[in-house]
Image: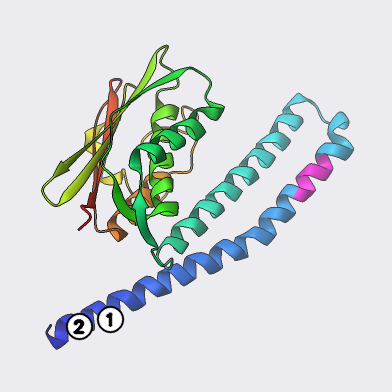
Amino acid sequence: MTRELKDNIEKLEASNKEMESFSYSVSHDLRAPLRAVDGFARMLEEDVADQLDEEGRRKLQVIRDNTRNMGRLIDELLEFSRLGRKELNYGHLDMSALAQAAFKDATSVAVNDTTLSLSALPAARGDITLIKQVWFNLLSNACKFSAKREQAHITVKGSVEGDALTYTVSDNGAGFDMRYYNKLFGVFQRLHRVSEFEGTGVGLAIVHRIVTRHGGRVWAEGVVGEGAVFHFTLPAAT
């Protein structure tokens, strides 16, 4: 390794650590004023709500709804920043069991009946906590964006291709416009309005970070109104 390359790697590592520390500090510093806003809004709601007209109560509810949403954004940002510091604990992964459990969790709050076709998946090695998160984020996204379908259906498949294990999650939901693909795995990037589908825009960024830390990659295809397909790989166990 050349000295220049080594220096660039060290600078990149230092920059990543600085960004992670910044995200962690900002997230914590945002909590105090956010709690104050929500606390005073709650007191107003309890003490003077009956003195407000319908529009006043609506605006008060908007304040509380947005403070809760901001709280979720902070939680997601903290989780994202921690991923860069967490040491990976490798172990055997029963990917079929992880996908099945994640689907059960994702559909526990579903508003419609979503069916799952789950093929036998090749086992892998990785950090079980983080790979669980990958499965949950992908399957909960599939459930969310298929929620408006009368017959929502999700398919999960896996294959071994050379030295890589490939896993695929597809749905028949809202899909997305491939013209905006470069935003798909970005932090706080959304391809649908909040009024259509709730969310913070961090879930896929977390998937991307976890998979790349394991030495894999993530990509997707989508068609508006016809569904989306997400793929991720992990190195085959040796």
Q: Main secondary structure of the magenta part?
A: helix
Quadrant where the C terminus lies?
bottom left
Q: Is residue 106 magenta?
A: no
Residue 6 has which mark? 2
Dot 1 and dot 2 residues touching (CB under 8 Å): yes
Q: Secondary structure at mark 1?
A: helix
In percent of the image, x 48 and y 31: which residue is there?
A: 104
Asked if residue 98 can be seen in this view, the reply is yes
Tell which residue pokes out farthest to the bottom in this image. 3
Q: Which residues are magenta?
A: 39-44
Looking at the picture, which amino acid does disc 1 mark? Glu
Q: Which residue is mark 1?
A: 10
In the structure shown, which secondary structural element does the residue marked by tag 2 occupy?
A: helix
Please, is residue 110 above or below residue 61 in the view?
above
Q: From this view, report whether residue 47 is shown above or below residue 8.
A: above
Q: Residues within 10 Å of mark 2 (few under 14, many from 20)?
A: few
